[in-house]
Image (cartoon, rainbow, N blue to C red):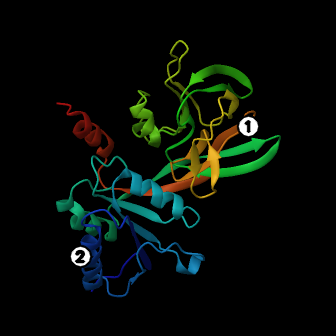
Amino acid sequence: MATSPFKKIGFYYRTDVPKTALWEERIRRWIKTRYPHAKILPANTIPRTRAHAPNLLIVLGGDGTICEAAQKYLRWNPLIIGLNLGHVGFLASVRTQRGFLKGLESIFQKKYRKVPRMLIQATLLRRDKKIFSSYALNEVGIQNLWGLVDLDVFVDGHPTQTIRGNGVLVSTATGSTAYNLSAHGPIVMPDIKCLIITELLDHNLPTPSLIIKRDRTIELVVRDFRKKDQFIVRKTAQTADVVLWADIEKMVAMEKGDRVVIKKSERLVRFAELDKNYFFKSLQEKFAFR
């Protein structure tokens, strides 16, 4: 009977994703058989105190679910192992279902690397008053949901870009394979700590993405947009045309003149990595490299 290196173990998954509940039950039985003294917490329960927080968080799903879990458990900073039930799974520790239990065995035997991932923090200022603040693992974006928005981009106070288009993304290296990739931004190795600025459908002369050092401050200023009030932000019941969002999970309606300040956060998210060349193998699978 082995001793578990993790006192408390949690599960997180989206209940509408096929096979998640079946895999949770299978993994629970596997843990209880081998590590009966480990405490397994109720799935999808976000702890309010450290006493109820997991040391290990097992996430069943794709990159979106893993990113969502990282947001929800950020305060407690558990080690995250992602078991991919999505597509490629750039953030997952194990890509295929046939490797789930073998991967978990490596985790419990401490045969893994702890990989810290950088977070960014975005603060929305309206008439110099803080309206909203959030962390993001992948990206922060400003976007007009149905039209154009005029934006100015500054790095350390220096103007770098004027955008008249759908919006702009500020991504981490982790987020370079998410929305940034869909917007034709660059792919950056996840252990490179940097910020990536990528415009969205700019009507001006297209500007390449800009990769900047992690210690710089980015400021995004909303200059103008046509107000139509065509959408409603569900959590706040605000009408919206242009929104600020962080990892899609958190969203707020924006007004003309709003400023968003984005900086590297001192907080980190810890992922378990089992394969040294995992990122390159994920790229190979995604793009069918030979």
Identify the residue at the far right of this view: 128
Q: Which residue is mark 1?
A: 258
Q: Is 197 placed above or below 28 here?
A: above
The numbered disc on residue 219 is none
Which of the two residues, 281 or 139, is positioned nearer the viewer here?
139
The spot of residue 199 in percent (x, y) is 53, 26
Residue 92, by quadrant, is bottom left
Q: Which residue is mark 2?
A: 26
Q: Is residue 73 left or right of residue 87?
A: right
Q: Nearer the viewer, mark 2 or mark 1?
A: 1
Which quadrant of the figure contains the C terminus? Answer: top left
Sequence-wise, the earlier of marks 2 and 1 is: 2
The spot of residue 116 in percent (x, y) is 49, 52
Which residue type carries mark 1?
Asp
Residue 132 at least partly seen: yes
The spot of residue 11 in percent (x, y) is 39, 71
The spot of residue 159 in percent (x, y) is 70, 21
Name the residue at 29% across, 43% down.
277
Secondary structure beneath dot 2 equals: helix
Name the residue at 39% across, 38% down.
177
Residue 191, by quadrant, is top left
Name the residue at 58% across, 49% down.
232
Neighbour tally class for label 1: few under 14, some 14-19, many 20 plus, Cα within 10 Å? some
Contact between marks 2 and 1 (CB within 8 A): the answer is no
Q: Is residue 177 left or right of residue 46?
A: left
Q: Is 15 placed above or below 182 here?
A: below
Residue 114 at least partly seen: no
Q: Is residue 98 left or right of residue 223?
A: left
Name the residue at 43% across, 41% down.
190
Neighbour tally class for label 2: few under 14, some 14-19, many 20 plus, Cα within 10 Å? few
